[in-house]
Amino acid sequence: MANSQHQVSKTIELHEKRDPVRNLWRNVLIVAIEDLLKKKEIHIKYNNKKYSLEEMWLHHEDFNLVCEWAQFEPKIIRKRIYEAIQKIERKYENKRNMSEMSGKWFYQSEEINRRPNRGSTTMYSVR
């Protein structure tokens, strides 16, 4: 428990001075995370198992450097990203379990759209 408090104190500091370089790297991190989550949502929505370039960057040493320059702890950022991905998965998990259409259209079905009985129609053939 003490270790997680130490990580949080490294991530959030009250009364910080304005640092334009740090803010630049934070914005780089924000844009990268947004791109990752957008692409991951598309993959989850269409049940695509591909591994995107953004996901690879998440496990690369460059991610750790950007987090360091943004003065964030990479483990915490990764944890938050995984939580967001799990939330997206829960959003689409019920939609994937919907029943599939049987493939038999109504107009092809004998039960629903039967051929009319010519003798029982309202219009009889004129003689």
Image (cartoon, rainbow, N blue to C red):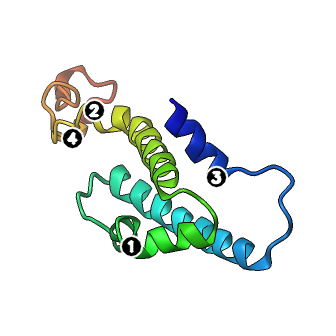
Residue tagged by mark 2? Answer: 97
Q: Residue at 46% x, 47% y: name it.
A: 79
At label 1, the amino acid type is Glu
Front of the two marks 3 and 2: 3
- x, y (%) of residue 73? 54, 56
- Front disc: 2 or 4: 2
Crowd rating for badge 4 (residues with CA inside 10 Å; few <14, some 14–19, many 20+):
few
Frontmost of labels 4 and 3 is 3
Q: Which residue does the numbered mark 3 point to in the structure image?
A: 11
Which labelled disc corresponds to residue 102?
none
Mark 3 burial class by Cα count in 10 Å: few <14, some 14-19, many 20+: some
Instruction: Say which element carries label 1.
Output: helix
- The quarter of the image holding the C terminus is top left
Marks 2 and 1, the one that precedes in the sequence: 1
Q: In terms of secondary structure, where does tag 3 sit? A: helix
Calculate the distance from the C-alpha at mark 2 to the C-alpha at mark 4: 21 Å
